[in-house]
Image (cartoon, grey):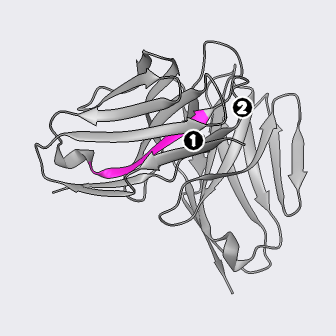
Amino acid sequence: GENVEQHPSTLSVQEGDSAVIKCTYSDSASNYFPWYKQELGKRPQLIIDIRSNVGEKKDQRIAVTLNKTAKHFSLHITETQPEDSAVYFCAASRLRGGYNKLIFGAGTRLAVHP
Amino acid sequence: SQTIHQWPATLVQPVGSPLSLECTVEGTSNPNLYWYRQAAGRGLQLLFYSVGIGQISSEVPQNLSASRPQDRQFILSSKKLLLSDSGFYLCAWRGSFLEKLFFGSGTQLSVL
């Protein structure tokens, strides 16, 4: 079945450093890749997403890159701040009728230390 | 704008008791609806999804069931809860273009 693997499971950085989280997916038909941020006890919130016809997307300090050939995609956070501390989830999905599942990675717990 | 409501926020239930969690979406029609479960410190496990009234797809065999009696209402149920049913339950919806998935605020279920 479909699978999304996410690494690392935990990541600790100093404030101002960059953080990179990587995911791989198994379903070659996947064409939509969102990233979610979840703070303790809260709902996951969509922070950025990318479609397979785009190799990179950036939103301020957050960027996502996609390598379709290798079935890899990554989240990059620059100039990290303590409020970036949270659990981050990647996900993969197909965008076509009749297939509606969004499969999540296991999550990365990011700690940003002042 | 679209909103998703999920209740209750917390629930403590004894083993063997029934369960009913409700989720409703406002401001959209014919959404795709989902139930996810998150064990403590773990990832998001897809339990059920629905593409329309009365249409339920189950992802994993378990002690739970789902129903969609109305277009924008999704219910998660159990006849007899198990200890292993404890977790953070999240309802979610996607629009007809199947892109962005939005989560409800979640229900923290503790089975004792």
Residue bearing mark 1: A5
A20 left or right of A55 in image: left
In the rendered image, the vertical position of residue B97 relative to residue A104, given as above or below: above
Q: Residues within 10 Å of mark 2 (few under 14, many from 20)?
A: many
- For the residues labelled 1 and 2, the Cα–Cα distance comes to 20 Å
Q: Amino acid at mark 1?
A: Glu
Q: Are marks 1 and 2 on the same chain?
A: no
Label pair 1/2, CB-CB below 8 angstroms: no
Please name whichever residue, A4 or B5, is drawn nearer the observer in this view of the structure: B5
x then y, percent, for residue A70: 75, 32
Q: Chain of mark 1?
A: A
The quadrant in which residue A26 appears is: top right
A18 left or right of A94 in image: right
In the rendered image, the vertical position of residue A12 relative to residue B94, given as above or below: below
Residue bearing mark 2: B99
x then y, percent, for residue A114: 69, 87
Tell me if residue B88 is in the magenta stretch: yes
* Closer to the eye: label 1 or 2: 2
Q: Which secondary structure, mark 2?
A: loop
Q: Which residues are magenta?
A: B86-93
Q: Amino acid at mark 2?
A: Glu
Q: Chain of mark 2?
A: B
x then y, percent, for residue B64: 28, 32
What residue is at 42 percent from the left and 59 percent from the top?
B41
In the rendered image, the vertical position of residue B87 relative to residue B76, given as above or below: below
Q: Is residue B88 visible?
A: yes
Magenta span: helix, strand or loop, mainly? Answer: strand
